[in-house]
Every structure is written in structure tokens, then in C-alpha cells.
Amino acid sequence: MTDPHQPLQTLAFTLTRADALAYELSRPLGGWRRWVLLIWLGLAGAWVAVLPEPWVEGWRFWVLGALAIGAHYLLATLALNLLARGRAARRVPTRLLTTLEIWGDYLTQQRGSDNLLVSLDAIAATSLTPTHLFIQVPPEVLILPRTAFKDPSGPEALAALIDAAGKE
């Protein structure tokens, strides 16, 4: 029988900017960022239309269009990556000692000097990646590296516990 005054599991780890960057890069491109990317690429393709007519006859049109869109796609990818790095730096400005306690129906996290108490049924979503478990608690996210778990199946078990609590 478990002691009701002790957590079921305690994870202690150091949260780094690389962990925050892993979260930022795992997020799908959506909202206004997707529209900016699509408009940016569309304008890159439209740029070909203002070239002199001999330059865009036949196959040259397709080559120049592909080059313009490809170059702008690389620039947009670079810009989105730099923006993600900035968001990661704001999310985790320095290395933070973090402790996560898993209780029966809630989680507590101490990250640096911040304390967070989260009921399992208040969690919006979980996301498993090969290196992390991300727990969405709007407006926050709990970032748990897989290396923080003693058991390799620990992240999946915690995600299943959270999903089961959300279905009740």
C-alpha cells in the first residue's frame, strides 16, 4: 500500500534551453505563422512575373520559379528557427533545477523558484517525442526529458495516466 503523504514518483532533472527548443520545434506551424509563410512563398513565386519576358519563356519560368520559392523557403525556415530559439530562451533563460512529483490525481513541479500545482484533469494535452514528454497546461507547458525517468516506459505510463484522468 502506498503512503498517501508521499508522491507516487519524484523526478529530479535540470531543464535546459535545449529542452525548451525541443518543445518549440515540435510544435506544428499554425495560426498566423502558417499564413505568413504561405504569403511569403506566394510573393516569391509572384516575383518571377515581374522578370523580363525573355527570361521567363518556356522552361526558364519553371526553373526561376522553383529557385525563387526554394530560396525563400530556406529563408523562411531560418527565420522560423531563429524565432523558435528566441521563444525557447524566454521559456528557459538559464539552466533550472526542476523537480516533478507525481501524486495520485495531480502533479507538482518546482522549477527554479516557481511552484506549479496541476490537477490531472486540467491538463489539455500530452505529446510524446523520442526525447521528451510535453504536458500542456495552458498557458504553461511542462517539459520532461525522457532521461528524467528511471524506467524507459515511464513517459508513456505518465501520459497514459494523464489521458485516463482526462476521460473520467
Image (cartoon, helix red, strand yellow):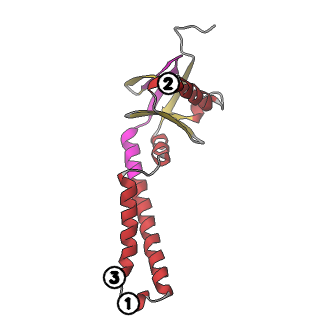
Q: Residue furthest toward the bottom? A: 54
Q: Which residue is labeled 3 in the image?
A: 50
Position of residue 66 measured from the top left corner of the image (x, y, whole percent): 48, 75
The residue pinned by badge 1 equals 53
Where 151 falls versus 21 (above or below)? above
Residue extending furthest toward the front = 168
Q: To which quarter of the image does residue 96 belong?
A: top left
Disc 2: CA contacts within 10 A as few (<14), some (14-19) or many (>=20): many
Looking at the picture, does residue 21 appear above or below residue 50? Answer: above
Dot 1 amino acid type: Glu
Vertical arrangement, residue 134 with respect to residue 44, above or below: above
> Dot 3: within a 10 Å radius of its alpha carbon, few (fewer than 14), some, or many (20 or more) residues?
few
Rounded to the nearest angstrom, the CA distance separating label 2 from label 3 is 58 Å
Residue 53 in view, yes or no: yes
For the residue labelled by badge 2, is the local secondary structure a helix, a strand or a loop? strand
Determine the CA span between mark 1 and mark 3. Answer: 8 Å
Q: Residue furthest right?
A: 152
* Magenta segment: 83-110
Where is residue 148 shown, x and y percent of the image? 57, 30
Identify the residue at horizontal 40%, vertical 24% (top origin). 116
Residue linked to disc 2: 100
Residue toward you, 44 or 167? 167
Q: Residue at x 40, y 28 (%)?
A: 112
Q: Residue at x 51, y 21 (%)?
A: 101
Which residue occupies the foreground of this view, 113 or 130? 130
Question: As shown in the figure, which amino acid type bears the numbered disc 2?
Answer: Leu
* Label 3 SS: helix
